[in-house]
Amino acid sequence: MSESSSIGIVAPQIAHFTEPLPLKSGEVLPQYDLVYETYGTLNAEKSNAVMICHALSGHHHVAGKYAETDKHAGWWDNLIGPGKPLDTNRFFVIGLNNLGGCHGSTGPSSIHPQTGKPWGSAFPVLTVEDWVTSQARLADYLGIKQLAAIVGGSLGGMQALQWTISYPERVRHALVIAAAPNLTAQNIAFNEVARQAIITDPEFHGGDYYAHQVVPRRGLRIARMLGHITYLSDDAMGAKFGRKLREGEIKYSFDVEFEMESYLRYQGDKFAGEFDANTYLRMTRALDYFDPALPHSGDLSRALAPAQADFLVISFTSDWRFSPARSREIVKALLDNELSVSYAEVTAAHGHDAFLMQDAHYHAILRNYLKKIKLGGPA
Amino acid sequence: MSNTSIKFADAAKSRHDFALIAKWIKPGAKVLDLGCGDGTLLGYLRDTLQVRGYGVEKDDANWLASMSNGVDVIQMDLEAGLSGFEAKSFDVVILSQTLQAVLNTEGIVQEMLRVGHEAIVTFPNFGYWRHRFQLIAGQMPVSKNLPYQWYDTPNVHLCTIKDFDEFCINHHIEVMERLVLTEQEPIHMMPNLRGSLAMYHLKPAE
Protein backbone atom coordinates (compact mmCIF):
# COMPACT_ATOMS: atom_id res chain seq x y z
CA MET A 1 0.00 0.00 0.00
CA SER A 2 1.38 3.36 -0.99
CA GLU A 3 2.04 6.02 1.58
CA SER A 4 -0.52 8.79 1.65
CA SER A 5 0.69 12.33 1.33
CA SER A 6 -0.56 15.81 0.58
CA ILE A 7 -1.37 16.81 -2.97
CA GLY A 8 1.17 19.60 -2.38
CA ILE A 9 1.00 23.06 -3.91
CA VAL A 10 -2.19 23.80 -5.82
CA ALA A 11 -3.56 26.84 -7.65
CA PRO A 12 -7.10 27.99 -8.36
CA GLN A 13 -8.38 28.56 -11.89
CA ILE A 14 -11.28 30.57 -13.21
CA ALA A 15 -13.79 29.48 -15.84
CA HIS A 16 -15.81 32.27 -17.44
CA PHE A 17 -19.27 31.46 -18.75
CA THR A 18 -21.04 33.75 -21.22
CA GLU A 19 -24.14 31.61 -21.75
CA PRO A 20 -26.84 33.08 -19.47
CA LEU A 21 -27.92 30.84 -16.59
CA PRO A 22 -31.69 30.72 -16.05
CA LEU A 23 -32.39 30.35 -12.34
CA LYS A 24 -35.22 28.58 -10.52
CA SER A 25 -36.38 31.94 -9.17
CA GLY A 26 -37.09 33.09 -12.73
CA GLU A 27 -34.13 35.45 -12.78
CA VAL A 28 -31.27 35.00 -15.21
CA LEU A 29 -27.56 35.34 -14.47
CA PRO A 30 -26.26 36.86 -17.72
CA GLN A 31 -22.66 35.74 -17.30
CA TYR A 32 -20.58 34.39 -14.47
CA ASP A 33 -17.25 33.04 -13.30
CA LEU A 34 -16.65 29.83 -11.41
CA VAL A 35 -13.40 29.45 -9.50
CA TYR A 36 -12.20 25.89 -9.19
CA GLU A 37 -9.23 23.67 -8.41
CA THR A 38 -8.33 20.25 -9.74
CA TYR A 39 -6.14 17.53 -8.27
CA GLY A 40 -4.79 14.47 -10.07
CA THR A 41 -4.95 13.85 -13.82
CA LEU A 42 -7.98 13.41 -16.06
CA ASN A 43 -7.50 10.09 -17.87
CA ALA A 44 -7.77 9.69 -21.64
CA GLU A 45 -11.33 8.32 -21.41
CA LYS A 46 -12.24 11.20 -19.07
CA SER A 47 -13.85 8.61 -16.85
CA ASN A 48 -12.09 9.35 -13.53
CA ALA A 49 -13.55 12.74 -12.57
CA VAL A 50 -14.90 13.27 -9.06
CA MET A 51 -16.57 16.55 -8.18
CA ILE A 52 -16.69 17.83 -4.60
CA CYS A 53 -19.71 19.94 -3.62
CA HIS A 54 -19.09 22.25 -0.68
CA ALA A 55 -21.29 23.03 2.30
CA LEU A 56 -22.45 26.37 3.71
CA SER A 57 -19.09 28.04 4.29
CA GLY A 58 -16.95 25.93 1.96
CA HIS A 59 -15.22 26.75 -1.29
CA HIS A 60 -13.01 25.44 -4.09
CA HIS A 61 -9.85 25.07 -2.03
CA VAL A 62 -10.53 21.50 -0.96
CA ALA A 63 -7.02 20.05 -0.74
CA GLY A 64 -3.37 21.05 -0.80
CA LYS A 65 -1.80 24.41 -0.05
CA TYR A 66 -1.14 27.53 -2.08
CA ALA A 67 2.31 27.92 -0.54
CA GLU A 68 4.51 25.78 1.70
CA THR A 69 4.09 28.41 4.38
CA ASP A 70 0.26 28.18 4.42
CA LYS A 71 -0.89 27.38 7.93
CA HIS A 72 -3.87 25.36 6.75
CA ALA A 73 -4.46 23.04 3.83
CA GLY A 74 -7.77 22.80 1.92
CA TRP A 75 -10.90 22.04 3.95
CA TRP A 76 -11.07 18.33 3.04
CA ASP A 77 -7.34 17.70 2.76
CA ASN A 78 -7.56 14.72 5.11
CA LEU A 79 -9.64 12.92 2.46
CA ILE A 80 -8.03 13.93 -0.83
CA GLY A 81 -4.47 13.34 -2.02
CA PRO A 82 -2.08 10.67 -3.25
CA GLY A 83 -2.86 7.45 -1.37
CA LYS A 84 -5.65 9.08 0.62
CA PRO A 85 -9.21 7.67 0.61
CA LEU A 86 -10.05 9.80 -2.43
CA ASP A 87 -6.80 8.92 -4.15
CA THR A 88 -5.53 11.51 -6.62
CA ASN A 89 -3.24 8.87 -8.15
CA ARG A 90 -6.46 7.38 -9.50
CA PHE A 91 -9.05 10.12 -9.61
CA PHE A 92 -9.22 13.59 -11.12
CA VAL A 93 -10.81 15.65 -8.37
CA ILE A 94 -12.61 18.95 -8.97
CA GLY A 95 -13.46 21.43 -6.25
CA LEU A 96 -15.36 24.61 -7.02
CA ASN A 97 -16.82 27.63 -5.29
CA ASN A 98 -20.57 27.78 -5.84
CA LEU A 99 -22.29 30.72 -7.46
CA GLY A 100 -23.23 33.33 -4.91
CA GLY A 101 -20.08 32.49 -2.99
CA CYS A 102 -17.42 34.87 -1.76
CA HIS A 103 -14.23 33.06 -2.72
CA GLY A 104 -13.90 33.98 -6.37
CA SER A 105 -17.03 32.70 -8.12
CA THR A 106 -19.59 35.30 -9.12
CA GLY A 107 -21.50 36.38 -6.05
CA PRO A 108 -23.02 39.37 -4.28
CA SER A 109 -19.64 41.01 -3.76
CA SER A 110 -18.70 40.67 -7.46
CA ILE A 111 -18.93 43.64 -9.79
CA HIS A 112 -22.21 43.80 -11.72
CA PRO A 113 -21.31 44.00 -15.43
CA GLN A 114 -23.85 46.74 -16.16
CA THR A 115 -23.48 49.02 -13.14
CA GLY A 116 -19.79 48.58 -12.46
CA LYS A 117 -20.64 48.29 -8.76
CA PRO A 118 -20.97 45.24 -6.51
CA TRP A 119 -24.18 43.26 -7.03
CA GLY A 120 -25.13 43.48 -3.35
CA SER A 121 -28.84 43.09 -2.75
CA ALA A 122 -29.47 42.72 -6.50
CA PHE A 123 -27.70 39.38 -6.62
CA PRO A 124 -30.34 36.67 -7.13
CA VAL A 125 -31.28 33.99 -4.62
CA LEU A 126 -29.86 30.72 -5.89
CA THR A 127 -31.03 27.16 -5.28
CA VAL A 128 -29.29 23.79 -5.07
CA GLU A 129 -30.72 23.03 -8.54
CA ASP A 130 -29.11 26.21 -9.93
CA TRP A 131 -25.76 25.25 -8.45
CA VAL A 132 -25.96 21.77 -9.95
CA THR A 133 -26.74 23.27 -13.37
CA SER A 134 -23.67 25.51 -13.08
CA GLN A 135 -21.56 22.59 -11.87
CA ALA A 136 -22.63 20.55 -14.91
CA ARG A 137 -21.53 23.45 -17.10
CA LEU A 138 -18.15 23.38 -15.39
CA ALA A 139 -17.95 19.66 -16.18
CA ASP A 140 -18.77 20.51 -19.84
CA TYR A 141 -16.06 23.16 -19.79
CA LEU A 142 -13.56 20.54 -18.58
CA GLY A 143 -14.73 18.11 -21.29
CA ILE A 144 -16.26 15.67 -18.82
CA LYS A 145 -19.47 13.97 -19.94
CA GLN A 146 -19.91 11.76 -16.89
CA LEU A 147 -18.56 11.96 -13.37
CA ALA A 148 -17.16 8.83 -11.77
CA ALA A 149 -18.57 10.27 -8.54
CA ILE A 150 -20.20 13.30 -7.06
CA VAL A 151 -19.29 13.81 -3.40
CA GLY A 152 -20.72 16.16 -0.80
CA GLY A 153 -21.38 16.57 2.90
CA SER A 154 -24.25 18.53 4.47
CA LEU A 155 -25.45 21.13 1.91
CA GLY A 156 -22.90 19.49 -0.40
CA GLY A 157 -24.69 16.17 0.07
CA MET A 158 -27.90 17.84 -1.08
CA GLN A 159 -26.12 18.93 -4.25
CA ALA A 160 -24.81 15.39 -4.80
CA LEU A 161 -28.37 14.08 -4.43
CA GLN A 162 -29.70 16.74 -6.83
CA TRP A 163 -27.07 15.74 -9.43
CA THR A 164 -28.57 12.26 -9.59
CA ILE A 165 -32.00 13.77 -10.28
CA SER A 166 -30.97 16.59 -12.64
CA TYR A 167 -28.33 14.65 -14.58
CA PRO A 168 -28.96 10.94 -13.97
CA GLU A 169 -26.86 9.84 -16.94
CA ARG A 170 -23.92 12.04 -15.99
CA VAL A 171 -23.10 10.58 -12.57
CA ARG A 172 -22.08 6.98 -11.86
CA HIS A 173 -21.75 7.20 -8.07
CA ALA A 174 -23.13 9.61 -5.51
CA LEU A 175 -21.62 9.94 -2.03
CA VAL A 176 -24.25 11.69 0.06
CA ILE A 177 -22.81 12.42 3.50
CA ALA A 178 -24.48 13.96 6.59
CA ALA A 179 -27.27 15.24 4.37
CA ALA A 180 -31.06 15.40 4.42
CA PRO A 181 -33.82 15.34 1.80
CA ASN A 182 -34.93 18.76 3.08
CA LEU A 183 -34.53 20.89 6.20
CA THR A 184 -36.71 20.35 9.25
CA ALA A 185 -38.66 23.30 10.69
CA GLN A 186 -36.06 23.48 13.47
CA ASN A 187 -33.26 23.79 10.91
CA ILE A 188 -35.08 26.54 9.03
CA ALA A 189 -35.57 28.27 12.38
CA PHE A 190 -31.83 28.25 13.08
CA ASN A 191 -31.18 29.68 9.62
CA GLU A 192 -33.76 32.40 10.19
CA VAL A 193 -32.15 33.49 13.45
CA ALA A 194 -28.79 33.65 11.64
CA ARG A 195 -30.29 35.74 8.85
CA GLN A 196 -32.06 38.06 11.27
CA ALA A 197 -28.77 38.66 13.06
CA ILE A 198 -27.26 39.82 9.75
CA ILE A 199 -30.23 41.71 8.33
CA THR A 200 -30.85 43.70 11.54
CA ASP A 201 -27.19 44.70 11.86
CA PRO A 202 -27.21 48.49 11.28
CA GLU A 203 -24.29 48.07 8.93
CA PHE A 204 -26.17 45.69 6.63
CA HIS A 205 -27.74 48.57 4.65
CA GLY A 206 -30.28 46.30 2.97
CA GLY A 207 -27.45 44.20 1.55
CA ASP A 208 -25.67 47.12 -0.12
CA TYR A 209 -23.08 47.64 2.57
CA TYR A 210 -20.20 47.52 0.09
CA ALA A 211 -21.07 51.06 -1.07
CA HIS A 212 -20.81 52.24 2.55
CA GLN A 213 -17.49 50.50 2.94
CA VAL A 214 -18.66 48.63 6.00
CA VAL A 215 -19.60 45.01 6.67
CA PRO A 216 -22.29 43.73 9.05
CA ARG A 217 -19.68 42.06 11.21
CA ARG A 218 -21.76 41.81 14.35
CA GLY A 219 -24.60 40.04 12.56
CA LEU A 220 -22.33 37.67 10.71
CA ARG A 221 -20.45 36.92 13.91
CA ILE A 222 -23.62 35.99 15.80
CA ALA A 223 -24.87 33.96 12.83
CA ARG A 224 -21.66 31.95 12.85
CA MET A 225 -21.69 31.46 16.61
CA LEU A 226 -25.22 30.09 16.43
CA GLY A 227 -24.35 27.87 13.49
CA HIS A 228 -21.27 26.57 15.22
CA ILE A 229 -23.27 25.47 18.27
CA THR A 230 -25.55 23.42 16.06
CA TYR A 231 -22.72 21.73 14.15
CA LEU A 232 -21.28 20.31 17.36
CA SER A 233 -22.84 17.86 19.76
CA ASP A 234 -23.48 18.57 23.43
CA ASP A 235 -21.10 15.72 24.30
CA ALA A 236 -18.31 17.03 22.07
CA MET A 237 -18.64 20.51 23.56
CA GLY A 238 -18.74 19.06 27.04
CA ALA A 239 -15.63 17.00 26.41
CA LYS A 240 -13.71 19.88 24.85
CA PHE A 241 -14.77 22.77 27.07
CA GLY A 242 -17.11 21.58 29.79
CA ARG A 243 -17.58 24.39 32.30
CA LYS A 244 -13.89 25.31 32.24
CA LEU A 245 -13.16 28.91 33.16
CA ARG A 246 -10.48 30.84 31.34
CA GLU A 247 -8.97 32.34 34.44
CA GLY A 248 -10.01 29.75 36.95
CA GLU A 249 -12.53 31.89 38.81
CA ILE A 250 -15.92 33.51 38.35
CA LYS A 251 -15.73 37.29 37.91
CA TYR A 252 -19.37 38.33 37.97
CA SER A 253 -19.04 40.07 34.61
CA PHE A 254 -20.17 39.68 31.02
CA ASP A 255 -16.69 39.33 29.66
CA VAL A 256 -15.38 36.05 28.35
CA GLU A 257 -15.25 33.79 31.40
CA PHE A 258 -16.02 30.30 30.15
CA GLU A 259 -13.72 28.58 27.65
CA MET A 260 -16.83 27.84 25.58
CA GLU A 261 -17.49 31.58 25.19
CA SER A 262 -13.91 32.22 24.22
CA TYR A 263 -14.05 29.55 21.52
CA LEU A 264 -17.35 30.81 20.11
CA ARG A 265 -16.17 34.41 20.00
CA TYR A 266 -12.96 33.34 18.28
CA GLN A 267 -14.89 31.35 15.67
CA GLY A 268 -17.36 34.20 15.17
CA ASP A 269 -14.65 36.85 14.77
CA LYS A 270 -12.60 34.73 12.42
CA PHE A 271 -15.60 34.01 10.21
CA ALA A 272 -16.85 37.62 10.20
CA GLY A 273 -13.45 38.72 8.99
CA GLU A 274 -13.38 36.47 5.95
CA PHE A 275 -16.94 35.64 4.86
CA ASP A 276 -19.51 37.73 3.03
CA ALA A 277 -22.84 38.33 4.78
CA ASN A 278 -24.83 38.34 1.54
CA THR A 279 -23.34 34.96 0.67
CA TYR A 280 -24.31 33.63 4.09
CA LEU A 281 -27.91 34.75 3.56
CA ARG A 282 -28.07 33.04 0.18
CA MET A 283 -26.40 29.80 1.30
CA THR A 284 -28.88 29.40 4.16
CA ARG A 285 -31.78 30.13 1.81
CA ALA A 286 -30.58 27.47 -0.63
CA LEU A 287 -30.64 25.07 2.31
CA ASP A 288 -34.17 26.12 3.29
CA TYR A 289 -35.55 25.78 -0.23
CA PHE A 290 -34.02 22.40 -1.07
CA ASP A 291 -36.87 19.90 -1.23
CA PRO A 292 -36.76 17.61 -4.27
CA ALA A 293 -39.91 15.81 -3.09
CA LEU A 294 -42.00 18.99 -3.14
CA PRO A 295 -43.10 18.75 -6.81
CA HIS A 296 -44.06 15.11 -6.12
CA SER A 297 -46.49 15.75 -3.27
CA GLY A 298 -43.71 15.12 -0.77
CA ASP A 299 -42.90 11.70 -2.19
CA LEU A 300 -39.09 11.45 -2.19
CA SER A 301 -39.20 8.04 -3.88
CA ARG A 302 -40.89 9.58 -6.90
CA ALA A 303 -38.45 12.49 -6.83
CA LEU A 304 -35.55 10.05 -7.05
CA ALA A 305 -37.17 7.91 -9.76
CA PRO A 306 -34.90 9.34 -12.50
CA ALA A 307 -31.71 8.53 -10.55
CA GLN A 308 -29.41 5.86 -11.98
CA ALA A 309 -26.28 6.28 -9.88
CA ASP A 310 -24.96 3.89 -7.27
CA PHE A 311 -25.18 5.50 -3.84
CA LEU A 312 -23.20 5.59 -0.65
CA VAL A 313 -25.14 7.36 2.11
CA ILE A 314 -23.41 8.12 5.42
CA SER A 315 -24.75 9.70 8.61
CA PHE A 316 -23.24 10.31 12.05
CA THR A 317 -24.88 9.21 15.28
CA SER A 318 -24.35 12.50 17.15
CA ASP A 319 -25.43 14.74 14.24
CA TRP A 320 -28.65 16.31 15.46
CA ARG A 321 -28.83 18.91 12.70
CA PHE A 322 -28.82 16.38 9.87
CA SER A 323 -29.72 13.34 11.91
CA PRO A 324 -29.38 9.70 10.84
CA ALA A 325 -33.18 9.54 10.55
CA ARG A 326 -33.00 12.08 7.70
CA SER A 327 -30.38 10.01 5.86
CA ARG A 328 -32.57 6.94 6.33
CA GLU A 329 -35.34 8.80 4.47
CA ILE A 330 -32.98 9.16 1.52
CA VAL A 331 -32.01 5.49 1.79
CA LYS A 332 -35.65 4.40 1.82
CA ALA A 333 -36.38 6.38 -1.34
CA LEU A 334 -33.36 4.78 -3.04
CA LEU A 335 -34.47 1.31 -1.91
CA ASP A 336 -37.95 2.01 -3.24
CA ASN A 337 -36.33 2.68 -6.62
CA GLU A 338 -34.24 -0.51 -6.34
CA LEU A 339 -31.03 1.47 -6.77
CA SER A 340 -27.68 0.24 -5.57
CA VAL A 341 -27.19 1.79 -2.14
CA SER A 342 -25.05 1.18 0.91
CA TYR A 343 -25.81 3.09 4.08
CA ALA A 344 -23.49 3.56 7.05
CA GLU A 345 -24.39 5.11 10.37
CA VAL A 346 -21.02 6.10 11.77
CA THR A 347 -20.64 6.28 15.53
CA ALA A 348 -19.09 9.69 16.09
CA ALA A 349 -19.03 12.24 18.89
CA HIS A 350 -18.49 15.39 16.83
CA GLY A 351 -22.04 16.09 15.67
CA HIS A 352 -22.62 17.46 12.18
CA ASP A 353 -18.96 18.44 11.81
CA ALA A 354 -17.99 14.75 12.02
CA PHE A 355 -18.13 14.54 8.23
CA LEU A 356 -14.98 16.65 8.05
CA MET A 357 -13.07 14.70 10.69
CA GLN A 358 -10.46 12.04 10.15
CA ASP A 359 -12.17 9.05 11.77
CA ALA A 360 -10.58 5.68 10.94
CA HIS A 361 -13.84 3.81 10.29
CA TYR A 362 -15.40 6.69 8.33
CA HIS A 363 -12.34 7.01 6.13
CA ALA A 364 -12.14 3.23 5.66
CA ILE A 365 -15.72 3.34 4.34
CA LEU A 366 -14.87 6.08 1.86
CA ARG A 367 -11.57 4.45 0.85
CA ASN A 368 -13.11 1.02 0.23
CA TYR A 369 -16.14 2.42 -1.59
CA LEU A 370 -14.06 4.63 -3.87
CA LYS A 371 -11.66 1.74 -4.52
CA LYS A 372 -14.55 -0.28 -5.96
CA ILE A 373 -15.35 2.37 -8.57
CA LYS A 374 -14.38 1.05 -12.00
CA LEU A 375 -12.83 3.62 -14.28
CA GLY A 376 -13.39 1.77 -17.56
CA GLY A 377 -10.87 1.50 -20.34
CA PRO A 378 -7.87 -0.77 -19.85
CA ALA A 379 -7.92 -1.78 -16.19
CA MET B 1 -15.36 -15.48 -13.08
CA SER B 2 -14.09 -12.43 -11.23
CA ASN B 3 -11.85 -12.61 -8.19
CA THR B 4 -14.72 -11.79 -5.88
CA SER B 5 -16.82 -14.59 -7.42
CA ILE B 6 -14.09 -17.11 -6.71
CA LYS B 7 -13.84 -15.73 -3.20
CA PHE B 8 -17.57 -16.13 -2.56
CA ALA B 9 -17.60 -19.63 -4.04
CA ASP B 10 -14.70 -20.59 -1.75
CA ALA B 11 -16.24 -19.04 1.31
CA ALA B 12 -19.56 -20.72 0.61
CA LYS B 13 -17.90 -24.17 0.55
CA SER B 14 -17.50 -23.99 4.31
CA ARG B 15 -21.16 -23.06 4.68
CA HIS B 16 -23.11 -26.01 3.32
CA ASP B 17 -26.34 -24.35 4.40
CA PHE B 18 -25.75 -21.56 1.81
CA ALA B 19 -26.16 -24.01 -1.07
CA LEU B 20 -29.35 -25.33 0.54
CA ILE B 21 -30.70 -21.80 1.04
CA ALA B 22 -29.94 -21.15 -2.64
CA LYS B 23 -32.20 -24.06 -3.61
CA TRP B 24 -35.18 -22.19 -2.16
CA ILE B 25 -34.48 -19.01 -4.13
CA LYS B 26 -35.44 -18.42 -7.75
CA PRO B 27 -32.79 -17.03 -10.12
CA GLY B 28 -32.97 -13.24 -10.37
CA ALA B 29 -35.02 -12.94 -7.17
CA LYS B 30 -34.88 -9.82 -5.02
CA VAL B 31 -33.40 -10.78 -1.66
CA LEU B 32 -32.93 -9.09 1.72
CA ASP B 33 -30.39 -10.74 4.04
CA LEU B 34 -30.83 -9.70 7.67
CA GLY B 35 -27.63 -9.85 9.72
CA CYS B 36 -25.63 -10.38 6.53
CA GLY B 37 -22.23 -10.59 8.26
CA ASP B 38 -19.44 -10.05 5.75
CA GLY B 39 -21.83 -10.46 2.83
CA THR B 40 -20.69 -13.97 1.83
CA LEU B 41 -24.21 -15.40 1.46
CA LEU B 42 -25.49 -12.49 -0.65
CA GLY B 43 -22.32 -12.50 -2.74
CA TYR B 44 -22.73 -16.24 -3.28
CA LEU B 45 -26.42 -15.88 -4.22
CA ARG B 46 -25.59 -13.02 -6.57
CA ASP B 47 -22.86 -15.02 -8.32
CA THR B 48 -24.80 -18.29 -8.54
CA LEU B 49 -28.40 -17.09 -9.00
CA GLN B 50 -27.96 -13.49 -10.19
CA VAL B 51 -30.17 -12.36 -7.31
CA ARG B 52 -30.48 -8.64 -6.65
CA GLY B 53 -30.47 -7.66 -3.05
CA TYR B 54 -29.36 -5.86 0.03
CA GLY B 55 -27.84 -6.89 3.29
CA VAL B 56 -28.69 -5.46 6.68
CA GLU B 57 -25.89 -5.37 9.25
CA LYS B 58 -25.40 -3.55 12.54
CA ASP B 59 -21.74 -4.28 13.26
CA ASP B 60 -19.21 -1.77 11.84
CA ALA B 61 -16.56 -4.33 10.85
CA ASN B 62 -19.09 -6.66 9.21
CA TRP B 63 -20.75 -3.74 7.44
CA LEU B 64 -17.41 -2.61 6.05
CA ALA B 65 -16.56 -6.16 4.93
CA SER B 66 -19.92 -6.51 3.15
CA MET B 67 -19.62 -3.18 1.39
CA SER B 68 -16.01 -3.88 0.43
CA ASN B 69 -17.12 -7.27 -0.95
CA GLY B 70 -19.43 -5.48 -3.36
CA VAL B 71 -22.63 -6.17 -1.44
CA ASP B 72 -25.11 -3.32 -0.96
CA VAL B 73 -25.56 -3.12 2.78
CA ILE B 74 -27.73 -0.99 5.06
CA GLN B 75 -26.44 -0.36 8.57
CA MET B 76 -29.26 -0.69 11.06
CA ASP B 77 -30.36 -2.58 14.13
CA LEU B 78 -32.87 -5.34 13.39
CA GLU B 79 -34.47 -4.80 16.77
CA ALA B 80 -35.86 -1.51 15.46
CA GLY B 81 -37.88 -3.38 12.83
CA LEU B 82 -37.79 -2.98 9.07
CA SER B 83 -39.74 0.27 8.76
CA GLY B 84 -37.31 1.46 6.07
CA PHE B 85 -38.60 -1.25 3.73
CA GLU B 86 -41.92 -1.30 1.89
CA ALA B 87 -44.37 -4.19 2.29
CA LYS B 88 -43.81 -7.04 -0.16
CA SER B 89 -40.81 -5.28 -1.70
CA PHE B 90 -38.65 -8.45 -1.64
CA ASP B 91 -39.17 -11.94 -2.99
CA VAL B 92 -37.29 -13.49 -0.08
CA VAL B 93 -36.07 -12.21 3.29
CA ILE B 94 -33.33 -14.30 4.93
CA LEU B 95 -32.41 -14.57 8.59
CA SER B 96 -29.47 -16.96 8.71
CA GLN B 97 -28.47 -18.20 12.20
CA THR B 98 -29.45 -14.93 13.80
CA LEU B 99 -32.98 -15.67 15.12
CA GLN B 100 -31.64 -16.96 18.43
CA ALA B 101 -29.78 -13.68 19.08
CA VAL B 102 -32.76 -11.40 18.39
CA LEU B 103 -34.63 -9.86 21.34
CA ASN B 104 -37.84 -9.04 19.52
CA THR B 105 -38.24 -12.47 17.92
CA GLU B 106 -41.96 -12.28 17.15
CA GLY B 107 -41.57 -8.77 15.75
CA ILE B 108 -38.71 -9.60 13.42
CA VAL B 109 -40.36 -12.71 11.96
CA GLN B 110 -43.56 -10.75 11.37
CA GLU B 111 -41.55 -7.94 9.76
CA MET B 112 -39.80 -10.46 7.48
CA LEU B 113 -43.14 -11.71 6.24
CA ARG B 114 -44.44 -8.16 5.81
CA VAL B 115 -41.46 -7.04 3.70
CA GLY B 116 -40.98 -10.31 1.82
CA HIS B 117 -43.29 -12.66 -0.05
CA GLU B 118 -41.31 -15.48 1.52
CA ALA B 119 -38.81 -15.87 4.34
CA ILE B 120 -35.95 -18.23 5.08
CA VAL B 121 -35.00 -18.71 8.73
CA THR B 122 -32.17 -20.91 9.98
CA PHE B 123 -31.19 -21.54 13.61
CA PRO B 124 -29.29 -24.01 15.80
CA ASN B 125 -31.66 -26.64 17.21
CA PHE B 126 -31.55 -26.50 21.00
CA GLY B 127 -33.29 -29.90 21.08
CA TYR B 128 -30.28 -31.63 19.47
CA TRP B 129 -29.38 -34.73 21.55
CA ARG B 130 -25.89 -33.51 22.37
CA HIS B 131 -27.43 -30.36 23.88
CA ARG B 132 -29.93 -32.46 25.82
CA PHE B 133 -27.12 -34.70 27.12
CA GLN B 134 -25.12 -31.73 28.33
CA LEU B 135 -28.19 -30.43 30.18
CA ILE B 136 -28.79 -33.85 31.76
CA ALA B 137 -25.11 -33.84 32.74
CA GLY B 138 -25.95 -30.57 34.48
CA GLN B 139 -24.39 -27.94 32.22
CA MET B 140 -25.51 -25.44 29.59
CA PRO B 141 -24.89 -26.86 26.10
CA VAL B 142 -21.79 -25.79 24.19
CA SER B 143 -21.39 -27.13 20.65
CA LYS B 144 -20.23 -26.27 17.14
CA ASN B 145 -23.50 -24.45 16.47
CA LEU B 146 -23.68 -23.03 20.00
CA PRO B 147 -20.04 -22.14 20.62
CA TYR B 148 -20.61 -19.80 23.58
CA GLN B 149 -20.45 -20.14 27.34
CA TRP B 150 -23.63 -19.25 29.22
CA TYR B 151 -22.10 -15.97 30.41
CA ASP B 152 -20.89 -14.63 27.07
CA THR B 153 -23.53 -15.90 24.66
CA PRO B 154 -25.38 -13.45 22.39
CA ASN B 155 -28.10 -16.08 22.12
CA VAL B 156 -31.14 -15.02 24.12
CA HIS B 157 -33.97 -16.90 22.39
CA LEU B 158 -32.82 -20.44 21.79
CA CYS B 159 -35.55 -22.84 20.68
CA THR B 160 -36.09 -26.39 19.48
CA ILE B 161 -37.56 -27.46 16.16
CA LYS B 162 -40.75 -28.44 17.97
CA ASP B 163 -40.90 -24.95 19.53
CA PHE B 164 -40.50 -23.25 16.17
CA ASP B 165 -43.11 -25.46 14.49
CA GLU B 166 -45.54 -24.43 17.21
CA PHE B 167 -44.49 -20.77 16.83
CA CYS B 168 -45.36 -20.92 13.13
CA ILE B 169 -48.79 -22.43 13.80
CA ASN B 170 -49.57 -19.84 16.48
CA HIS B 171 -48.42 -16.94 14.28
CA HIS B 172 -50.25 -18.07 11.11
CA ILE B 173 -47.07 -18.84 9.26
CA GLU B 174 -47.01 -21.56 6.63
CA VAL B 175 -43.93 -23.77 6.57
CA MET B 176 -43.36 -24.32 2.85
CA GLU B 177 -40.29 -26.48 3.38
CA ARG B 178 -38.17 -27.57 6.31
CA LEU B 179 -34.67 -29.04 6.28
CA VAL B 180 -32.78 -30.35 9.28
CA LEU B 181 -29.05 -31.02 9.14
CA THR B 182 -26.33 -32.52 11.25
CA GLU B 183 -22.75 -32.28 10.01
CA GLN B 184 -24.17 -31.15 6.65
CA GLU B 185 -26.27 -34.35 6.26
CA PRO B 186 -30.06 -34.12 6.06
CA ILE B 187 -31.89 -35.70 9.01
CA HIS B 188 -35.33 -37.16 8.34
CA MET B 189 -35.89 -39.43 11.35
CA MET B 190 -36.52 -37.72 14.70
CA PRO B 191 -35.12 -34.39 13.50
CA ASN B 192 -35.73 -32.54 16.78
CA LEU B 193 -33.48 -35.04 18.57
CA ARG B 194 -30.94 -35.79 15.86
CA GLY B 195 -30.68 -32.46 14.00
CA SER B 196 -28.29 -29.66 14.92
CA LEU B 197 -29.30 -27.03 12.35
CA ALA B 198 -32.87 -26.19 11.32
CA MET B 199 -33.78 -24.41 8.09
CA TYR B 200 -37.28 -23.12 7.37
CA HIS B 201 -38.81 -21.75 4.18
CA LEU B 202 -41.83 -19.71 5.24
CA LYS B 203 -44.67 -17.59 3.96
CA PRO B 204 -47.73 -16.06 5.60
CA ALA B 205 -50.53 -18.63 5.95
CA GLU B 206 -53.42 -18.09 3.50
Image (tube, coloured by chain):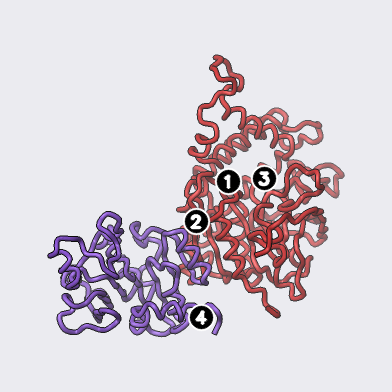
Both labels 4 and 1 in a single chain: no
C-alpha distance separating marks 3 and 2: 21 Å
Q: x, y (%) of residue A335? A: 46, 67
Residue A98 visible, this angle: no
Residue located beneath label 2 in the image = A327
Between the C-alphas of marks 4 and 3, the distance is 44 Å
Residue B171, percent from left and from top? 20, 68
- Residue B110: x and y, percent? 27, 66
Decide: few, some or many residues near mark 2? Use Cα within 10 Å; few <14, some 14-19, many ≥20: many
Closer to us: A136 or A23: A136
Q: Which of pointers 1 and 2 lies earlier in the amino acid sequence?
A: 2
**Mark 2 and mark 1 in contact (Cβ < 8 Å)?**
no
Residue type marked 1: Asp
Nearer the N terminus, badge 1 or badge 3? 3
Looking at the image, is B6 positioned above or below residue A165? below
Q: Left or right: A328 with respect to A111? A: left
> Disc 4 and disc 1: Cα gap in Å?
38 Å
Give the chain letter at badge 4: B
Report how far apart the C-alphas of labels 1 and 2 lie in the structure. 15 Å
Q: Which residue is mark 4?
A: B5
Q: Quadrant of the C terminus of chain A?
A: bottom right
Residue shown at the point (60%, 37%) measured from the top left: A194
Q: Looking at the figure, which quarter contains the N terminus of chain A?
A: bottom right
Q: CA distance from mark 4 to mark 2?
A: 31 Å
Which residue is under mark 3?
Answer: A57
Q: Colour of chain A?
A: red
Residue flagged by tag 3: what amino acid is it? Ser
Please identify the quarter of the rendering in which residue A259 is found: top right
Q: Which residue is mark 1?
A: A353
Residue at image position (37%, 77%) is B15
Q: Secondary structure at mark 4?
A: helix
